Image (cartoon, grey):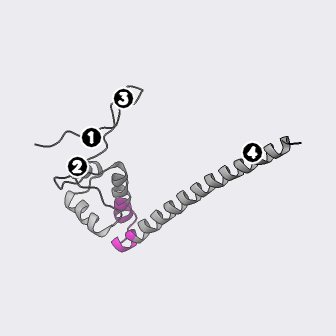
């Protein structure tokens, strides 16, 4: 017998909770991509790697579903080859990582600037 779906906490606005995990069948229905194609894409696109449950079934998350939609767009709408789409995805992932690193560095620099300003303020108070 299958497990009950996993849900996030209910929103304060009274809306139903959002699901965290989706089966490959549900993802297939949502994205209009056949299940066998999703399994194949998992093999050829390393960044599409949904976790697997103990039973071995896939547990797609929102980020995985977005990646499926992006791959579908690249292949079917923009006409990329699998190799070209894989290269484009890799580039986008690297750019996202670089952006996250720059944001983290900017936050650290802001913190250091604030600390220096606090030290300067303390020094100004002393006679």
Q: Earlier in the sequence, mark 1 or mark 3?
A: 1
Dominant secondary structure of the residues highlighted in magenta in the image: helix
Q: In the rendered image, which residue does mark 4 sit on?
A: 118
Comparing 81 with 6, the one in front is: 6
Question: Which marked residue is nearer to the observer: mark 4 or mark 3?
Answer: 4
The picture places residue 64, in percent across and down from the top left corner, at 34, 54
What crowding class fits label 3: few (fewer than 14 Cα within 10 Å), some (14-19), or many (20 or more)?
Answer: few
Q: Secondary structure at mark 3?
A: loop
Please state the extent of the stretch shown in magenta in the rendering.
71-86
**The C terminus is located in which quarter?**
top right
Tell me how far mark 1 sits from mark 3, CA to CA: 16 Å
> Disc 4 or disc 1, which is closer to the eye?
4
Q: Which of the two discs, 4 and 2, labels the residue nearer the N terminus?
A: 2
Q: Which mark is residue 6?
A: 1
Q: Which residue is mark 2?
A: 23
Q: Which residue is mark 3?
A: 15
Give how far across and how far down residue 69 sits, in percent: 35, 55
User: Distance of mark 1 from mark 2, alpha carbons?
Assistant: 11 Å
Q: Which of 121/21 is in front? A: 121
Q: CA distance from mark 4 to mark 3?
A: 45 Å
Q: Residue at x 30, y 38 (%)?
A: 7
Q: Residue at x 38, y 69 (%)?
A: 86
Residue 25, horizontal then vertical, whole percent: 20, 50
């Amino acid at each position: 017998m299958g497990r009950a779906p996993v849900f996030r906490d209910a929103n304060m606005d009274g809306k139903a909770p959002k699901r965290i995990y989706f089966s490959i069948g549900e993802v297939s229905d949502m994205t209009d991509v056949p299940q066998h194609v999703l399994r194949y894409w998992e093999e050829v696109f390393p960044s599409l790697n949904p976790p697997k449950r103990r039973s071995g079934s896939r547990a797609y998350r929102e980020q995985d579903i977005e990646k499926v939609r992006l791959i579908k767009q690249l292949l079917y709408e923009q006409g990329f080859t699998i190799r070209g789409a894989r290269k484009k995805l890799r580039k986008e992932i690297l750019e996202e990582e670089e952006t996250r690193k720059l944001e983290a560095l900017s936050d650290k620099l802001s913190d250091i600037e604030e600390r220096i300003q606090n030290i300067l303020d303390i020094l100004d108070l002393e006679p």
